[in-house]
């Protein structure tokens, strides 16, 4: 039987997406990355059809003897990479990892402290996300706009006053390392735990270019596995405290996860191996590229946040684009030029500004993995300048971007 029209339409749309995003656009979304062909080959496996509720070798299903070994190996590799005693790789996303830890360490009605949303906090930490859904009451920590970071003095004072069940650090926008060690004294004084959401910086931690929160005093780390860490989409929980681990593992299953998408385990394990061997070089180049892109944009007249501190110490660059029409308008204009970014709230934005916030967020981890270096950041900044300041036709710039993107055909920081 020939494929029906519906099937052909699906194939055509999927092919168009793959060609556009992988060959024609420059992807600067800070929460995305590319997996290697080796990781892809493991991801596409029979395990995607199988179930394995529970823990390795203690399943509620038969037929998992090899999957059990893969999961244990994945855990071993991640423990080695992040110097963690206990790990759970079963959460299927960073938000699920957050939910499991929030549920395990708190109860409805408890007060928590979080990085404010306009300061980069993730929605899952807020009253609008899983935090609020669990009945927890998050209070935003004071934020220093000049430093683009948590205000240590104000945050310490708040923690001592409200005695939160736990404090959540880490963010969706994180230009500079959050003060885990600095807030640890205040948290310990009142018996609060510190949770660090490392979703955006996990690969930088693996590469030794961002402080390991567990070494800095965090009680538990949650993360996704597909941003600066170049694995398949999924989540992970890490801790050095057995009591926390015992609570969390009983929540991951059966509360938040049934089957945990088994085909990603081998793929995640291989991404961990890649980071063990190439992580330091990869993370180092990411930060070099982010700093250089920020400088190039600043030199072309863009309002780049974090200027006084060297713009960034992570993969991210943050622009204030209010004078250019706001984040929504700017992101759409760049998309027409085949440059993919996302709009983002800035510290002075109000909740009602979410539809057109002040900023755009840029991440360089994917372009770094396809081989771009500091000199290429100059080229990218020039495209921004042409579209947003010179107001050249985005369609014309899109052709330049497509040609430029075509030069980068090899994925780096993996095994050949």
Image (tube, helix red, strand yellow):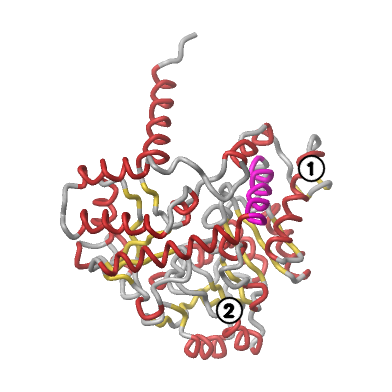
Quick check: marks 1 and 2 in contact, CB under 8 Å? no
Please name the residue shown 47% across and 80% down the image: 150
x, y percent for residue 59 = 80, 44
The image shows residue 190, relative to residue 19, as above or below, that is below
Q: Secondary structure at mark 2?
A: helix
Which region shows up in magenta? 263-277
The image shows residue 306, relative to residue 382, as above or below, that is below
The image shows residue 273, relative to residue 101, as above or below, that is above
Q: Secondary structure at mark 1?
A: loop
- Residue 280's disc is none
In space, the residues marked 1 and 2 are separated at their CA atoms by 39 Å
Relative to 190, 318 lies left or right = left
Relative to 335, 139 lies left or right = right
Q: Quadrant of residue 29?
A: bottom left
Relative to 295, 157 lies left or right = right
The image shows residue 90, relative to residue 196, as above or below, that is above
x, y percent for residue 200 = 51, 62
x, y percent for residue 323 = 19, 67
Residue lying furthest front: 375
Please name the residue shown 66% across and 69% down the image: 220
Between 29 and 285, the one nearer to me in the picture: 285
Q: Which residue is mark 2?
A: 180
- Residue 60's disc is 1
x, y percent for residue 141 = 47, 80
| 276 part of magenta stretch | yes
| 28 part of magenta stretch | no
Please identify the dominant SS of the magenta region: helix
């Amino acid at each position: 039987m020939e494929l029906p029209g519906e099937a052909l339409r699906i194939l055509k749309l999927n092919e168009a997406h793959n060609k556009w995003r992988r060959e024609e656009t420059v992807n600067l979304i800070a929460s995305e990355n590319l997996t290697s062909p080796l990781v892809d080959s493991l991801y596409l496996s029979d395990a995607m059809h199988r179930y394995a509720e529970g823990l390795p070798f203690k399943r509620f299903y038969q037929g998992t003897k090899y999957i059990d070994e893969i999961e244990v190996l994945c855990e071993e590799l991640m423990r080695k990479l992040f110097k963690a005693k206990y790990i759970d790789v079963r959460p299927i996303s960073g938000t699920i990892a957050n939910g499991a830890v929030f549920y395990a360490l708190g109860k409805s009605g408890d007060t928590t402290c979080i990085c404010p949303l306009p300061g980069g906090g993730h929605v899952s930490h807020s009253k609008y996300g899983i935090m609020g859904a669990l009945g927890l009451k998050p209070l935003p920590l004071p934020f220093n706009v000049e430093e683009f970071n948590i205000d240590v003095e104000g945050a310490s004072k708040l923690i001592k006053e409200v005695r939160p069940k736990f404090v959540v650090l880490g963010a969706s926008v994180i230009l500079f390392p959050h003060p885990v060690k600095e807030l640890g004294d205040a948290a310990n004084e009142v018996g609060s735990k510190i949770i660090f959401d490392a979703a955006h910086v996990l690969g930088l931690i693996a590469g030794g270019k961002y402080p390991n929160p567990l070494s800095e005093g965090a009680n538990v780390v949650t993360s996704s596995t597909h941003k600066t860490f170049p694995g398949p989409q999924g989540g992970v929980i890490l801790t050095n405290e057995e009591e926390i681990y015992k609570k969390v593992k009983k929540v991951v299953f059966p509360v938040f996860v049934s089957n945990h998408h088994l085909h990603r385990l081998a793929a995640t394990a291989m991404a961990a191996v890649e980071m063990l061997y190439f992580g330091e070089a990869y993370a180092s180049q990411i930060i070099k590229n982010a700093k250089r892109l920020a400088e190039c944009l600043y030199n072309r007249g863009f309002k780049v946040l974090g200027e006084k501190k060297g713009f960034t110490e992570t993969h991210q660059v943050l622009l204030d684009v209010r004078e250019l029409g706001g984040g929504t308008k700017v992101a759409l204009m760049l998309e027409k030029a085949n440059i993919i970014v996302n709009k983002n709230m800035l510290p002075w934005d109000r909740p009602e500004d979410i539809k057109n916030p002040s900023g755009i967020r840029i991440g360089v981890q994917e372009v770094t993995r396809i081989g771009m270096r500091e000199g290429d950041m100059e080229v990218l900044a020039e495209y921004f300048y042409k579209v947003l300041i010179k107001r050249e036709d985005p369609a014309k710039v899109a052709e330049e971007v497509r040609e430029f993107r075509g030069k980068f055909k090899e994925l780096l920081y993996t095994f050949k």
